Image: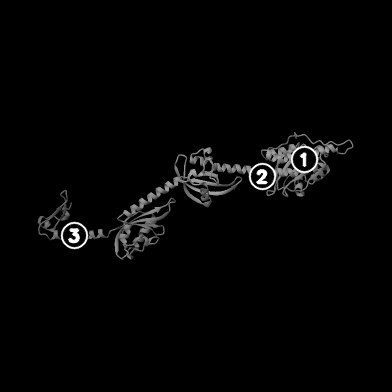
Amino acid sequence: MKKKTEHSQYPQKNRQDSPSGQEDPQASLLHSRKINKTLFDISLAVNTTADINELYHFIHKTLADVIDVTNFFIAILDQEKRTLYFPYHVDEIDELFDPITDFDVHSCLTGLVISRRQPVLMKKNELRQRAARNGVWGVVPQVWMGVPLIVKNEIIGIMAVQSYRDENTYSDHDLQVLAAVSHQVALAIDRKRSHDELKKSEQRFRQLFEQYNDAIFIYDLQGRIIDCNAQAVRMFGYSREEMLKTVVTRLFPGREDTGPDKFIENIIEQSRSLIESQMQKADGTIIHVEITSCLMEEEQGKVVQQVARDISPRKEMEQALEKSHRQYIQLFNASVDAIVRYDAKGRVEYLNPAFTRMFGWTFEELRGKRIDFVPPEAVEQTQAIIDKMIRGEKIANFPTRRLTKDGRILDVALSVASIINDNNENIGNVVIIRDETERRKMEEELEKSRQQYIQLFNASVDAIVRYDAKGRVEYLNPAFTRMFGWTFEELRG
């Protein structure tokens, strides 16, 4: 609240005394009634004022009926921070009402009240003596009176009045009056602060509730929706008014006719557990959701709070990945070449039927294991492959040899591809193994046949020449050289 330093606008108390100098009984009775009314009004103000600052203002105004509040302040104590705050003050002269941090009870009158935990009334002479010892904060008044504000035996602050004009402005009777209302004032301030904090907390909760990215429903044990957030309205396509007329089972396809008692029973059984389900939007669209539900106790009784997260995009991605995985497995299984997928530690994650046909081991035999099928003469070659993989080099049709389950040695060609994750980390490899044994036998047979063909050419007594399609010499035998004089080297090509 903004500092108030203007003169008080409230009327000062006016106690009437009899001509003999003694208090008029009728006036005293009237004053007592004013005090009681003040206490009653302050107690009501907790509910009638908008906030704590308005309550302070009301207390000041109300006290003006029973005491001079021309110069008035309320100080609130923060015990943990050892700090005094002055949220409300009205003063004719002194404008210094900044918070007092790490205050010394001997350096200010407010601290004195806190240390004594009792009402304090000081007049001019005593105030001057205390000021001489630096025991007064700010302008020294003619008279000063303060009372502690105590709630549940804990000081929450003080309330004080003072006068710069007349040290007789306040008496012991006034001190008793201020002390009498202090308890009600303390209760009112404490309750209002708690009420304001609760209101702020509820506002924060409501803001969080409305801004939450997931749909939130609150419904009673009959399944009737009693509250929902903005995301629930957006996600399901109903207006808020429609939603609050809806039974929650309507949002679950196939559950429309399910009795709410049974439905709620199932929800309670799954309370505070994460489940996946399907829910239905206003237009009939089915969406996949993750649901967390919990049973809560509220003023109107037990209710269920349910949070629903739309995971349809994730489900679609999972289905696409599953489809891709199936296609990938089908491709692996259809390959005539042996294919093995290893993890980062070289353990088998998958192998195809062609591997079993080629080497004899089944997937069940080798799952999660390393394959010991490198013959001694191929160990060095295999290490060379590993080194290339580490350097990031491409490996395609690398010739080597591998052992079968029954001990045969196969000539093979290896092609290797690394599996890289989103963090650019190598998490495994796919190795394609082609059996080169039959091809190499065929190559050897062809070479043998070629050598026999050349021997036959060379043994002929007749000149023989082999031309290509363009009539260029591909080969001629020794008999040609003897007959015509040209050598093969002279006529080649």
Label 2 or label 3, whichever comes before in sequence order: 2
**Residue that label 1 marks:** 36
Q: Which residue is mark 2?
A: 194
Amino acid type at image mark 1: Asn
**Among numbered discs 3 and 1, the one appearing first in the sequence:** 1
Q: CA distance from mark 3 to mark 1?
A: 128 Å
**Color theme of the render:** one colour
Q: Residues within 10 Å of mark 1 (few under 14, many from 20)?
A: some
Kindly state the secondary structure of the residue where label 1 is placed.
helix
Q: CA distance from mark 2 to mark 3?
A: 104 Å
Specify whether 61 is left or right of 379: right
Looking at the rendered structure, the kind of residue marked 2 is Ser
Location of residue 157 by image quarter: top right
Measured along the vertical axis of the image, is residue 393 above or below residue 31? below
Pointers 3 and 1 in contact (CB under 8 A)? Answer: no
Q: Is residue 400 visible?
A: no
Amino acid, disc 3: Ser
Q: Position of residue 114 (x, y in %)?
A: 75, 48
The x, y position of residue 372, in whole percent, is: 36, 64
Return the residue nearer the eye: 67 or 238: 238
